[in-house]
Amino acid sequence: MKTAGTGARRLHIPRSGSSCGGSAFRRAGQRANNNAFGKSIHGPGKEHAAEIGVNIVSIEEFPPATVDLTTELMRFKRGGAEYVFMQMLPAAIITALRCGQALL
């Protein structure tokens, strides 16, 4: 498993065509804060996605204090994202998950 950036951990995403819950996936969204920490994952994220056959349908950046991400998460949904990977602190991840629940 590779790492991207200093201290970053990379989520293992099965290669295209391999099984994950019974189905292959190829589309993901990338969500990050609009600061140096968040933007640091854009290049490595695109690189790794290309290596494993995943298409990044959208990269969305937000200020760390954003409280409603529903509109932005809809862009992922419209783009066909099956997964979203994030580079942010835990409180912002919780906000994103809560907003994502509204889209289910």
Image: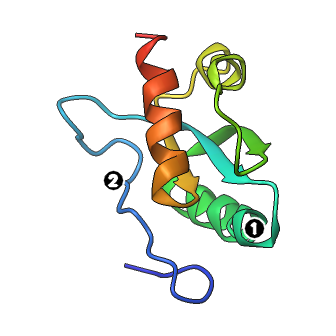
**Measured from the top left, where is residue 36 in percent x and y?**
81, 72
Question: Is residue 85 depicted above or below 28 in this figure?
Answer: below
**Secondary structure type for disc 2:** loop
Mark with earlier residue (1, 2): 2
Q: Using the image, tell me which numbered label, if any, was put on residue 43.
A: 1
Residue 1 falls left or right of residue 66: left
Q: How busy is the neighbourhood of tag 2: few (under 14 within 10 Å), some, or many (20 plus)?
A: some
Q: How busy is the neighbourhood of tag 1: few (under 14 within 10 Å), some, or many (20 plus)?
A: few
Pick the quarter of the image with the N terminus: bottom left
Residue at figure coordinates x 55%, y 38% from the top left: 28
Q: Nearer the viewer, residue 100 or 4?
A: 100
Pick the quarter of the image with the C terminus: top left
**Measured from the top left, where is residue 101 in percent x and y?**
41, 18
Residue 80 visible, this orientation: yes
Q: CA distance from mark 1 to mark 2?
A: 19 Å
Q: Nearer the viewer, residue 39 or 43?
A: 39
Q: Give the residue number, with chain letter if any, for mark 2.
A: 14
Question: Is residue 36 depicted above or below 89 in this figure?
Answer: below
